[in-house]
Image (spheres, rainbow, N blue to C red):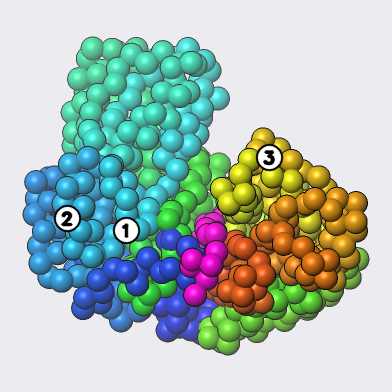
Amino acid sequence: MKKLKKILALAVALVMMFSLTACRITIDGENNSQKKKVTDGSIGLSVSTQNNPFFVSLVDGAEKAARDLGVELSVADAGDDVTKQVADIEDLIAKDISVLIVNPVDSDAVAGAVQSAIDQGIMVISVDRVVNGVTVDCEIASDNVAGAELATQYIVDTLGENIKVAELQGTSGASAAIDRGTGFHNVADAKLEVVASQVADFDRTKGMSVMENMLQANPDIQAVFAANDEMALGAVEAISGAGKDILVVGFDATDDALAAIRDGRMGATIAQQPELIGYTAVENAVNMIEGKEVPASIPVEVTLVTAENVDTYAAASAGSGEIVGNGSIGLSVSTQNNPFFVTLAEGAQKAADDLGVSLTIVDAGDDVTKQVADIEDLIAKDISVLIVNPVDSDAVAGAVQSAIDQGIKVISVDRVVNGVTVDCEIASDNVLGAELATQYIVDTLGEGTKVAELQGTSGASAAIDRGTGFHNIADAKLTVLASQVANFDRTEGMTVMENMLQANPDIQAVFAANDEMALGAVEAITGAGKDILVVGFDATDDAIAAIKEGRMAATIAQQPDLIGYTAVENAVKLINGESIPSSIPVEVTLITIENAE
């Protein structure tokens, strides 16, 4: 098993530049990164401070990615001085970098320098903290509000409501400080008595000093929320020096904080993954340099760490857990009688070939009973990771849960598995895509237009979400004359459309929940000699050709090959004991004759 992990880790390192796990995916043939000036292919990282273990780990992750991917990375430490950070960014710009990765000291104060980089054609990724007032290419950050809410609710659950609590705030102006303060007050203002709240600049020494002053003014403090572990550990020192017993909760899950929790000196912390944040930032900087598009944001989950789970968390973050199975991956795809899923499977196979892992692909043929049997067969093959594209998001839940119960990791692609918590969901924003498509009908033909809907397979999450998006717009702005299921199938799309036209000859537009049904509708419309605007979803080659020829008006673009590639890529990370995001969003874009080339 250890030998397998090493082989897989080497394979991942050699091909990581093809990774798609991080920043903006806009699928419309209009590549934002191709508009940018790619200079010498080097990357600059401006970090707020390395006088903090969290950011040391972040930089370590970034440097490891740079070594693995063979790219030049220049790291500048601002030392928590925003004036120096502005100068650092100017210096990095002068080095003719292609991508700037920035972890702001102050989210407002660095905006001008970051905008200057963008104006000069440099792509920008923000990490851990946002840059206010500037549109960067990608934001990689934890959900700081949710994390602080978890931490504060832990205080409530442990000591009860209305206890006296103090807050140690982070650096003024830093988005992480603002968000964590917001999360704290979301809970504390309703359930606790906040007797003190002061800035300690994310610093351990300042945390101790501020805590000493707080205790002198408020000797009856019962709990402390600190917006990072460094301040929390400083507070612990002050509390220990005062001979008091006060519950302290921090944020970051640094090694020192975990040790303090084990020793009973701290109550809890919120876990992030700074090394993964740094690695992911460089990984996706390389993607942008290569002209690949990446998601606009990458959420990084947070977790409450207490004495009950500190050892489990530490082991998981170190990747020390044994991997269930033989290191192979199974992909259960709903159907390959659809170009979208053929392309998805091809992307998955390419990733498996690149990464040197075993991938077994099974085609359910749009039969949920067969898919359940397929999943059971994959489980019997002792796979380590199951990638599933459900025929029906409800009906496969039992089989998927069975895989999870046997220790198999699960990634869902394109469609979710209802009622089951999988390790990662990789899917497009189907609701938004259908809203874009339906609004296009409104913009083209006007409100009140008579429209028909071709629905996807009943129970499939993509069908449900695309239907929701359609009706979000259509019910308010259009006249929906007909809405029928055509099971994502071209032949059924044609048949259903023929029937609709017989019953409603005055249909003016059609929204089809995928391109196969849309193309079937086009055939029926052509056969009837009518001129009806048709909009689909998926941007298959046939649909793009139909748009260019004027037979279809528009479609919604996804990247099925990249969805498949990303799924296998992240399956390998799970096998290697690495953490991955719980969801990887894939943005969608409207394709019309104007941008179909």
Of circles 2 and 1, the one toward us is 2
Identify the element where label 2 is drawn: helix
Asked which quadrant contains residue 336, the reply is bottom right
Mark 1 = which residue? 125
Was residue 584 drawn as part of the magenta stretch in this picture? yes
Foreground of the two, 340 or 393: 340
Mark 2 surroundings within 10 Å by alpha-carbon count, few (fewer than 14), some (14 through 19), many (20 or more)? some
Residue that appears at 38% across and 45% down: 252
From mark 1 to mark 3, how far is it between C-alphas? 43 Å
Vertical position of residue 82 compared to residue 16: above or below: above
> Which span of residues is magenta-colored?
577-597
Marker disc for residue 86: none
From mark 2 to mark 3, how far is it between C-alphas? 46 Å
Quadrant of the drawing holding the N terminus: bottom right
Mark 2 = which residue? 116
Mark 3 surroundings within 10 Å by alpha-carbon count, few (fewer than 14), some (14 through 19), many (20 or more)? some
Of circles 1 and 3, the one toward us is 3
Identify the element where label 3 is drawn: loop
Mark 3 = which residue? 448
Q: Which of marks 1 and 2 precedes in the sequence?
A: 2
Foreground of the two, 320 or 536: 536
Q: Which of marks 3 and 2 precedes in the sequence?
A: 2
Identify the element where label 1 is drawn: strand
Residue that appears at 85% across and 50% down: 504
